[in-house]
Image (cartoon, rainbow, N blue to C red):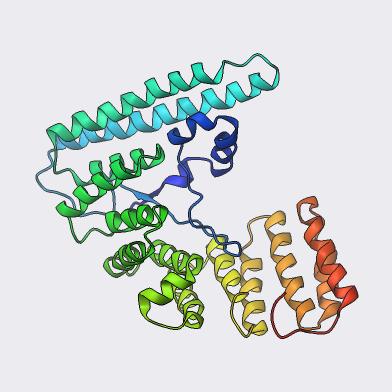
Amino acid sequence: MAIFIIWSKRSEKYYGRLRWTYPFLKGYFLCVDLFRNTLLLTQLFLVVAGIKAETKKNTSHSLVAEKEFRSVLLLDDKIHAEVDQWIRDNAKLTEKKSGVPVESLGEQVRIRLNKVEESYVAFLAKYPKHVEARLAFGSFYSGLGKLDDAMGQWSDALDLDKKNPVPWNNIGKAYGQKGKISEAIRHFTKASELAPNQPLYYRNLAAMLFAYPDQAARYYLVDRSKVVPKVLLLFKKAQVLDPKNFTLATDTAMVHLATRPLDAKEAINAWNNALLLAPDSRSKEGVRIHLARIHAHIGEVKTARKLLGDVREPKFSELKEEILKKINSSPKPASAMP
């Protein structure tokens, strides 16, 4: 099984900067900042087909077609890499007041990306039933902000292969962007049913429910208080399938902070698990901030201070001071997280 996650190929931080540096280009860059809840660290992931995509191989595809499809994908990656480099270089030059005007750069970008679009169109004119190509073309359009075109390609892929979870997932992501939460939930749910051993789909569904608890409650015809437990269940299913994933562990731990009443023991266990998986010192310090907050909340001030003592990253200094201030002013535990 080979699934390529778009955001692993495009820098989220970089594109975030581009959206305000070059606003006129915003439609030409992949935006992965989807449905982020203030507590939730996760992103909704968009799955695209690769040469060995998670999709049933269409036996009518000839070796020639697959070779041509590989060429289209390579061209897509090559041109995106070129565009990325152009913009990085121009950003540096602009700081020195010697960069290319943004309008001129934008035109260059459009010309290059149009070649990718033409390549997909030509390929699909020859092989209209190529599922992987329609998935990839849809993802290309999604990266340009052309959601309707993207959904058109993914819908065509779905018509060709109803049992493929990828188009269900991607269409769910698009519906979420459009604010059609019920449809997003329905599509994410179907993706998880079709691929029960794929943690990605549980994560996406959980993230959607957590970001939109009122709509989720209406969808399932339950009280709003029942949504967070359902989110936790989905994240735990994903964790069983991907137990060493740090981001998944922090997502799960974050959801614990939203439980009412707060189960401090479960929350601490979840964050300690994330601490064990943290890939670097900055990540560890971020986890310690959350642990300190919980320990302070339940009156374990000594433990909270010890955790904060190991936090030295300037990025967390404001949060650290905020927690210390609360410890000093009100050491007694409260009934809910502040």
* Residue 42 picture location, percent across and down: 53, 59
12 to the left or right of 2: right
Q: Is residue 310 visible?
A: no
**In the rendered image of this protein, does residue 327 appear above or below residue 27?**
below
**In the rendered image of this protein, does residue 120 appear above or below residue 92?**
below
Q: Residue extending furthest right?
A: 328
Q: What residue appears at the point 65 percent right and 23 percent down from the top-left corner?
A: 92
Q: Is residue 175 visible?
A: yes
325 to the left or right of 16: right
* Residue 220 picture location, percent across and down: 36, 78
Please identify the quadrant where the N terminus is shown.
bottom left
* Residue 131 picture location, percent across and down: 20, 47
223 to the left or right of 277: left
Q: What residue appears at the point 56 percent right and 34 percent down from the top-left corner?
A: 18
231 to the left or right of 111: right
* Residue 71 picture location, percent across and down: 28, 30
**In the rendered image of this protein, does residue 98 appear above or below residue 33?**
above
Q: What residue appears at the point 31 percent right and 35 percent down from the top-left corner?
A: 73
Q: Give the image quarter of residue 336.
A: bottom right
Q: Nearer the viewer, residue 163 or 227?
A: 227
Please identify the quadrant where the C terminus is shown.
bottom right
Q: Give the image quarter of residue 289.
A: bottom right
Count of number-bearing discs: 0
**In the rendered image of this protein, does residue 217 appear above or below residue 166?**
below
